[in-house]
Image (spheres, helix red, strand yellow):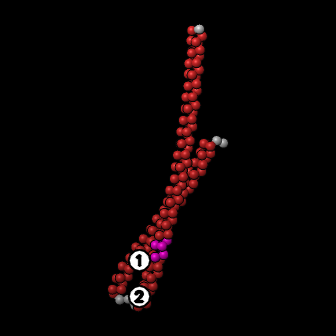
Amino acid sequence: MDRLSLLHTLLEREKEKRDAALADWRNAEAQERAAREQADSLVTYRSEYRKRWAAQFAQRAPIEILHCYQGFVDRLEQAIGAQQGVAEQAASRVQAARQRLRHRETKVATVQRLIERRLQANALREHRREQKTVDEAAQRLAWSRTSVFAVAAA
C-alpha cells in the first residue's frame, strides 16, 4: 500500500472521529438546553406558586399552612439550585465537546493538507520527469542532426 493510500485511510478515520465528536457536541448541546429549560420551568413555577399563595396569605392563613408553604418553597429553591448546577455542568460538557470537535476538525484539515501537498509533489515530480524526457529527446535529435551535418560536410 503506497503512502498516499495510507493517508487517505488516515483521513477517513479522522473524519469518522470528527463525525463522532460532532454527534457528541450536538448531544451535549441538547442536554444543556433541556437542563436550562427544566431550570427555567422550576423558576417560573416558583413565581406562579408565590403569586397564587400571596392572595391566600393576604386574607389569613393558619400557621400550619404557612409552615407547609415555607417548607415547600425551601425545597423548591433547593431543586432550582440543583437544576441550575446540572445546567452549568451541561454547559461545561458542551465546552469540552466543542474543544474536542475543534481538535478533530484540525486533524482532518491537517491530513487533507498533507494529501494535497503529496499530490502536488507527485505532480511536480511527474512534470520534471516528462520535461527531462523531452529535453533528452531534443538533445538526441540535436546530436543526430549535428552528426548528420558533420558527416555531410566531410
Residue 10 shown in magenta: no
Residue 32, percent from left and from top: 48, 65
Q: Foreground: 87 or 4?
A: 4
Residue 27 against residue 107 in the figure, above or below:
below
> Residue at the spot x=41%, y=74% of the render?
43
Q: Position of residue 111 (x, y in %)?
A: 55, 48
Amino acid type at mark 2 = Leu
Relative placement, left or right, of 80 versus 110 is: left
Q: Which residues are magenta?
A: 81-86
The quarter of the rendered structure image containing the C terminus is: top right
The numbered mark at residue 66 is: 2
The answer to which of marks 1 and 2 sits earlier in the sequence is 1
Mark 1 lies on residue = 46
CA neighbours of label 1 inside 10 A, class few (<14), some (14 to 19), many (20+): some
Residue in the picture at 50% in, 69% down: 89
Q: Quadrant of the N terminus?
A: top right
Question: Residue at position x 56%, y 56% from top?
Answer: 20
Q: Nearer the viewer, residue 38 or 150?
A: 150
Main SS of residues in magenta = helix
